[in-house]
Image (cartoon, rainbow, N blue to C red):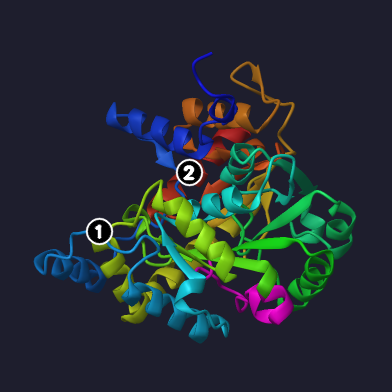
């Protein structure tokens, strides 16, 4: 085999694959309603785009320091202080080519062959693939709607073994939209600190939150701060998915090792995107507030509408822009002569039979669910859910 063992075991991103298939059908003239998108459907705010244009006009198109410009690190530091009551020095912050890149670098930096990474399930699809690349092993902690899809302190404590290196915590969560409260994080932080493991706190959806305040686990004391690498970025909050700017903050020695890795892989993130991200973090937040308000409106509609469809149901997500829809009531039933055995079967049937694109829950770790994104227009949400109801009624 010419492909290395390390890369041959990695699966392609199913969310990107489904989105690509739906776009191909749309290009062929088929009216597909897409519920697969993991990005805001809003345009990047004007003030951010203007900052990028000014950077180009000023000739800010050369290499920057690998770990990010001073201006962007200062803006990130100020954001952490203002929003999370966290203080980080410039050498405790790194800017990468998206939050995904930051997480990848952390896992590669911390994990050795045979180390174990604790991962709550359902999980974002890329986490286990990154762990594979590092040669480490994923230890899944299954959650249910009864626990609001959050792990318990007892689960975490039982899962920690001598080879455990870190826990990946995602709040607000993709795909469930659930958010850990301060008291829940405090209990988890005690166990992490006592065991001496590390925590990746993926907070990329921090700004897209509706019913409660976001709390970063790193803000709960010096002990847990020393064990935590906080990851965030501008993609979801400022509709900047294509700009590819994420950042991480944590212990200096870990950040330096990540920077060394970045030196020999991507080097610096795009200079122009960094200049735009400074404006995103320190400029007007009016567009962000409008976007979150619209997401909440869509969420409320989608939750009520899904729960009115016989055979499926959903919890009320507290953040992000996804509904985690329970399909167990329609599994083992037939559609167009084919039995629906799992979430992928339903995904294929909906795309081909109803021209609706969803993401199967199996790729997130639970085949009894599908994920619907409400990062699309209200018109699409109404039509898409009508199609799903008609399909299920058959």
In this rendered view, identify the residue nearer to me: 74 or 34. Answer: 74
Q: Is residue 197 above or below residue 369?
A: below
Farthest top residue?
1
Number of residues whose C-alpha sits closer than 10 Å to that of mark 1, classed few (under 14), some (14–19) or many (20 or more): few
- Which residues make up the magenta segment? 205-225
In this rendered view, identify the residue nearer to me: 84 or 258. Answer: 258
**Could you say where residue 290 lies in the image, as x and y percent from the top left?**
38, 74
Relative side of 271 to 156, left or right: left
Please name the residue that numbered disc 1 is placed on: 63
Q: Per the image, is 214 magenta?
A: yes
Q: Quadrant of residue 288?
A: bottom left
Relative side of 50 to 320, left or right: left
Q: Per the image, is 69 magenta?
A: no
The chief SS type of the magenta part is: loop
**Which element is circle 2 on?**
loop
Quarter holding the N terminus is top right
Reading the chain from its start, which is encountered first: label 2 or label 1?
Answer: 2
**Could you say where residue 225 lies in the image, as x and y percent from the top left?**
66, 75
* Labelled pair 2, 1 in contact (Cβ < 8 Å): no
Please name the residue that numbered disc 2 is placed on: 36
Q: Is residue 220 above or below residue 360?
A: below
**Could you say where residue 110 lies in the image, as x and y percent from the top left?**
63, 53
In this rendered view, identify the residue nearer to me: 252 or 319. Answer: 252
Q: Is residue 360 in sight in this rendering?
A: yes
Q: Quadrant of residue 173?
A: bottom right
Rounded to the nearest angstrom, the CA distance separating label 2 from label 1 is 35 Å
- What's the mark number on residue 15? none
């Amino acid at each position: 085999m010419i492909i290395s063992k390390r890369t041959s075991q990695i699966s392609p991103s199913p969310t990107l694959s489904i989105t690509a298939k739906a776009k191909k059908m749309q290009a062929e003239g088929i009216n597909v309603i897409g519920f697969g998108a993991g990005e805001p459907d809003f345009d990047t705010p004007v003030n951010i785009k203007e900052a990028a244009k000014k950077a180009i006009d000023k000739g800010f198109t050369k290499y920057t320091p690998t770990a990010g410009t001073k201006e962007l690190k200062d803006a990130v530091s100020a954001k952490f202080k203002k929003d999370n009551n966290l203080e980080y020095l410039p050498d405790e912050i790194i800017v990468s080519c998206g939050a995904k890149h930051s997480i990848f670098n952390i896992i590669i930096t911390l994990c050795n062959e045979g180390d174990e990474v604790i991962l709550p399930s359902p999980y974002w699809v890329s986490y286990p693939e990154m762990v594979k690349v590092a040669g480490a092993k994923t230890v899944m902690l299954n959650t249910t709607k009864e626990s609001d899809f959050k792990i318990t302190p007892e689960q975490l404590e039982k899962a920690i073994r001598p080879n455990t290196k870190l826990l990946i915590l995602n709040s607000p969560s993709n795909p469930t939209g659930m958010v850990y409260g301060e008291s829940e994080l405090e209990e988890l932080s005690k166990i992490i600190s006592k065991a001496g493991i590390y925590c990746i706190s993926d907070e990329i959806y921090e700004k897209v939150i509706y019913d409660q305040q976001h709390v970063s686990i790193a803000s709960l004391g010096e002990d847990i701060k020393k064990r935590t690498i906080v990851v965030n970025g501008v993609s979801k909050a400022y509709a900047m998915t294509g700009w590819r700017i994420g950042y991480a903050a944590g212990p200096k020695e870990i950040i330096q090792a990540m920077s060394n890795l970045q030196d020999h892989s991507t080097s610096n993130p795009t200079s122009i995107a960094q200049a735009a991200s400074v404006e995103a973090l320190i400029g007007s937040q009016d567009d962000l507030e409008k976007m979150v308000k619209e997401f909440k409106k869509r969420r409320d509609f989608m939750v009520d509408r899904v729960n009115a469809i016989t055979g499926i149901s959903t919890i009320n997500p507290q953040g992000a822009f996804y509904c985690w829809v329970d399909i167990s009531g329609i599994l083992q039933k037939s559609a167009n002569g084919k039995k629906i055995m799992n979430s992928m079967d339903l995904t294929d049937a909906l795309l081909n039979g109803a021209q609706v694109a969803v993401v199967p829950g199996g790729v997130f770790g639970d085949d009894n669910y599908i994920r619907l994104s409400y990062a699309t227009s209200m018109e699409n949400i109404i039509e898409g859910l009508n199609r799903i109801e008609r399909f299920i009624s058959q």
